[in-house]
Amino acid sequence: MRLYFSGIGGVGIGPLAEIAHDANHMVVGSDMQKSSITQQLQAKGIEVMIGQDGSQIQKAHEAASIDWFIYTSALPPDHPELRYAHDNGIRVSKRDEFLAYFIKDHDLQLVAIAGTHGKTTTTGLFMYALHHLDIPLSYSVGTTVSWASSGAYDSASKLFVYECDEYDRNFLHFEPSLSIITALDHDHVDTYPTVEDYRDAFVKFLQQSSYSMIWEKDLRYLETSDDINYEAYDENLDLSYITLPGDHVRHNAYLVERAIQRLFPDLDQQKIIQAINAFPGTARRFEKLAENLYTDYGHHPTEIAATLQLAREINDHVVLVYQPHQNVRQHEIRDQYRDSMKLAETIYWLPTYLTREDPNLPTLTPEDLLNVLVNNDVAHPAKMNEVLWTSIENARAAGKLVLCMGAGTIDGWVRQQLADT
């Protein structure tokens, strides 16, 4: 088949394009701008067109008929490419519909890694451990990693490991053989307005899974275990044998260890642990950019607290630069920030990155948000400018660890400042 991926440079669509390419489909796609993922795809011989005004898909379709148009939930209904696909009778699906088809068509056993926090790191851990153990694997992870592609299909593999996102109820397209639930905490209020909506979706997802692995605290959060086949673990386990930094990372690693043991009971446990402990990490998850400078995708109070705990294992002096994500989300989680940043010595709070917003909601300012902190005396409104970069450089020079967090533009800005110095 000839497949067209709209938003091919995104962390959800890009890996799917690689997977389809590995399975010998003809792949072409578009995005608004170049990125590390588009470069990765082009290096594999995949055609990537920059721009999405409709002329790109028209050109591709006229060159050779497109059989299937695949897109993300972020694409608006009136998007030029989506309109063109409908108008020209091209099959149209969101990314998870296509992936569900692919997994079934290739008779793969799905290992789905789901949860509010920790999906990417846990998926990366799983991938790395199986690579380390020389087990063939097909997979998709929502980031880039230094040691592999973001997505791959191996015809020798029996497993497909997938970072299974709950946004827009995407994960309900799947019926996993094994589900791993990393952590649960109400999120994506535009999809799940209430806690009950969020819980109900995860309960349904677990009911669709043949077997699930979950922490006891998250099972309690769901308030039901009806029709779920599961194994639950005490979150207070001694995990000192896992040497990766960060309490939340060690807990994620434990889930990976148990899953591999279940899937491959003949493997030596010590070899599994050795593979896990060798994990080098993934992009944007406490990724080291330079000496005393780290970047992280986290943008929820629970993620912030966990990543600060990790940072404090490395350095007693942590400076946090934080860019909130989505104003509508800030209205929902504002009070949850209260003690989430108490491990930071200094906090620089940036304006919220705006996307998919409700125009009727007033935009919360940095002052509105940082005032809820128990340690707001060390928090300062800031902007991504020369003043902030000077503060970052001074903190690094003083031996402090600077952690830049957010899902918006902060990562690109920091990388650009480094490139310019």
Image (spheres, rainbow, N blue to C red):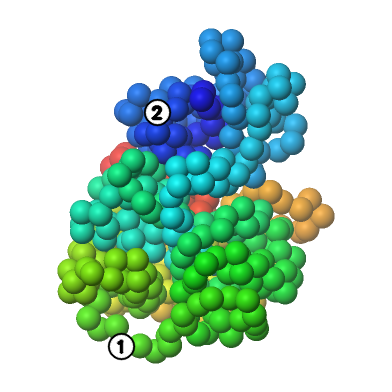
Would residue 65 appear left or right of 158 to someone viewing this image? right
**Above/below status of 304 relative to 324:** below
- Along the viewing direction, whichever of 16 and 186 lies nearer the viewer: 16
**Above/below status of 244 relative to 13:** below
* Number of marks present in the image shown: 2
Residue position for label 2: 24
The residue lying at 71 percent from left, 64 percent from top is 192
The residue lying at 58 percent from left, 21 percent from top is 66
Report x, y in % for residue 240: 25, 83
Q: Is residue 148 visible?
A: yes
**Above/below status of 113 relative to 228:** above
- Other-residue count near label 1 (Cα within 10 Å), few / some / many at <14 / 14–19 / ≥20: few
- Along the viewing direction, whichever of 189 and 251 lies nearer the viewer: 251
- Other-residue count near label 2 (Cα within 10 Å), few / some / many at <14 / 14–19 / ≥20: few
Check disc 1 and give the amino acid type.
Answer: Asp
> What element does badge 2 sit on?
loop
Would residue 213 appear left or right of 337 to someone viewing this image? left
Check disc 2 and give the amino acid type.
Answer: Asn
The residue lying at 58 percent from left, 85 percent from top is 220
Q: Which mark is residue 238?
A: 1
Q: Is residue 294 visible?
A: no
Report x, y in % for residue 241: 22, 81
- Along the viewing direction, whichever of 60 and 204 lies nearer the viewer: 204
Marks 2 and 1 in Cβ contact (< 8 Å): no
